[in-house]
Amino acid sequence: MRAENGVVGARQTQRALGFSSPALAVYHLDKLADLGLAEKTRGEYRLVKTVNVGVLKQFVRFGTFMFPRYLLYASMFTTLLVFYLTQFRQVNFYSVFALILSVISTGVMWFETMRAWRQKP
């Protein structure tokens, strides 16, 4: 929904979102105002802050705690790397290749985990 001056009313919101009544639109607009995302002035609402909800797809909720989805993968690769290091017996092409691949994979997963964590809203 786009408004020319950035201000929308309850009826305009109701029509644009297909709500059953303007009261429902006011309820949701008031919730946005309570969260600090919208500002209410004389019955009209203006967007104050935009939230990127797409970043939440990268997170998993565990109770009240949210952590990046990559944390699971990073933990798995770290566990596999530690296991491989404890089982490392002989040095040949395949063992060195597996070691390099494990270290790179673990590093990439931890990098992506930290990057997602910094984007957390």
Image (spheres, rainbow, N blue to C red):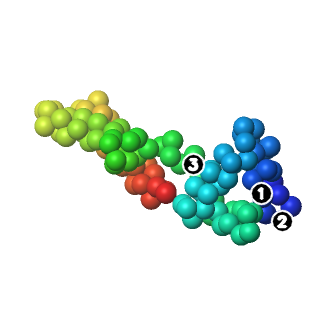
Amino acid under label 3? Val
Residue beneath the point at 78% across and 58% down = 8
Between the C-alphas of marks 3 and 1, the distance is 23 Å
Residue 100 in view here = no
Between the C-alphas of marks 1 and 2, the distance is 12 Å
Q: Position of residue 87 (x, y in %)?
A: 14, 33
Crowd tier of the residue under label 3, counting other residues whose Cα lies within 10 Å: few below 14, some 14–19, many 20 or above: few
Residues at discs 3 and 2 in contact (Cβ within 8 Å): no
Mark before the other along the chain sequence, 3 or 1: 1
Crowd tier of the residue under label 1, counting other residues whose Cα lies within 10 Å: few below 14, some 14–19, many 20 or above: some
Q: Which mark is residue 1?
A: none
Can you identify the residue that label 2 sits on?
Answer: 5
Which is closer to the viewer, label 3 or label 2? 2
Residue beneath the point at 61% across and 57% down = 30
Q: Which mark is residue 9?
A: 1
Query: What secondary structure is found at the residue carrying circle 2?
Result: loop
Instruction: State the residue in front, 94 or 28.
Output: 28
Can you identify the residue that label 3 sits on?
Answer: 53
Amino acid under label 2? Asn
Residue 22 located left or right of residue 54:
right
Amino acid under label 1? Gly
Crowd tier of the residue under label 2, counting other residues whose Cα lies within 10 Å: few below 14, some 14–19, many 20 or above: few
Query: What secondary structure is found at the residue carrying circle 3?
Result: helix
Residue beneath the point at 68% across and 48% down = 23
Residue beneath the point at 18% across and 35% down = 83
